[in-house]
Amino acid sequence: MKNGLRRLGLDGDYDESELPLLLTRRGMAEWTGDAVRLLDRRDLPRTVRFITCREVEDVARAIETMAIQGAFTLSLAAGYGMALALLSAGTTGDGERRLAQAARRLAATRPTGLALRRMIVACEAAAAKARDRGEDAVDAIVRTVDGKAAELARQALATARHALPLLAGAEAVLTHCFADRSLLYLLLEAKRAGRSMHVFCSETRPYLQGARLTAPAVLEIGHRATVITDGMGGFLMRRGEVQAFLTAADRVCLDGTVCNKVGTYQFALAARANRVPYYVLRQSGPDLESPDESHVEIEFRDGDQVLSFMGARTTVEGVDALYPAFDITPPELVTAIVTDRGIFEPLAVADYAQRAEARA
């Protein structure tokens, strides 16, 4: 706190000083008035460096090259990218066309991502309404993104509060990749309750989000973090060293199917075999346009990324590589899906829309 004044985080509860870097405003995406400022997560945890995006293409490339990641941050960056599209049009009268182009370009950066597409649609609607009223469409988009950011942060905190009782007897948990805001809020809430947690973080090849993002954030909050390779989860579960497996989800279908970072499926199989509950933190519920996995497009990324580690090639020339970014976990392997509106059995998650909105 500066001069005795609190600067609340987007959630409206925690002070920014209480939050790990990746939950702060500067740790995600910020609108500067004529550009988008992004924390380059590729350099973490060794270096804190920021990228300034002045064109839509700059934002798109930041997403595609994994300079930023996580559904929350991606959606904010895409939303502010839509504002850049209109800003670049100026008074040329070309704003509507540029906005449509930006929407297509930004949506294509993450075919599997749902939050990003929802933000783009909201920005298009805000711009159209502003034009009809003779108002500034850029300001309308920025206000929309800022409002959505606060709403999503409150959703994440509500999700964490619903999830915490599920871990009443747990001392250690396993997570995969970077589970974004809900997991970190869960750990913050545990700390508030006076609990100490031990979080095993899979390193998450090839970008090492678990080692570079999740583990440092766990330490920042004040809990114990242990990094494991992506093949060690079953070993831990069989030995009884973790009492729960927790992930976020890039998408949840209406039938309870979960799409998340590739590797989630094998962890879920090991969890079921060893009677370890698997809890999915999906703050905004299922995708109403995805009845089942046939409606999910799995993004395949450049296989060359699998053939190197920290810039050094790990095998000989001529070897091929495969890199699906996500996989599918069927509902029978999921214990519960936790949302901002409460806890759902996987096969009942379609009831999310009928349940009253919860408030953190």
Image (cartoon, rainbow, N blue to C red):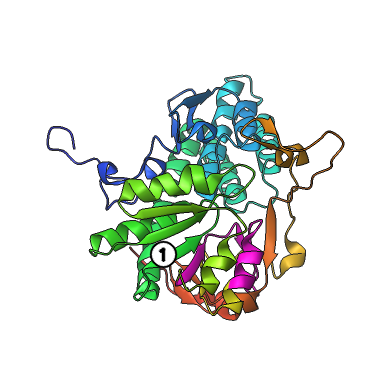
Does residue 118 belong to the magenta stretch? Answer: no
Name the residue beneath numbered marker 1. Answer: 159
User: Which picture quadrant has residue 264?
Assistant: bottom right
Q: At 66% from the left edge and 34% from the top edge, which residue is drawn?
A: 102
Type of amino acid at the residue the image marks with label 1: Thr
**Residue farthest along the left direction in this orientation:** 4
- Give the position of the C terminus as an image quadrant: bottom left
Magenta residues, start to end: 243-270
Q: At 74% from the left edge and 63% from the top edge, which residue is drawn?
A: 295
User: Which picture quadrant has residue 315?
Assistant: top right
User: Which picture quadrant has residue 53?
Assistant: top right
- Give the position of the N terminus as an image quadrant: top left
Picture coordinates of residue 114, whole percent (x, y): 61, 54
Residues 322 and 13: in front is 322
Picture coordinates of residue 304, whole percent (x, y): 76, 37
Residues 14 and 132: in front is 14
Tell me, yes or no, if residue 166 can be seen here: yes
Residue density around tag 1, few if under 14, some if 14–19, many if 20 or more, within 10 Å: many
Does residue 267 belong to the magenta stretch? Answer: yes
Q: Is residue 49 left or right of residue 257?
A: left
Tell me, yes or no, if residue 10 can be seen here: no
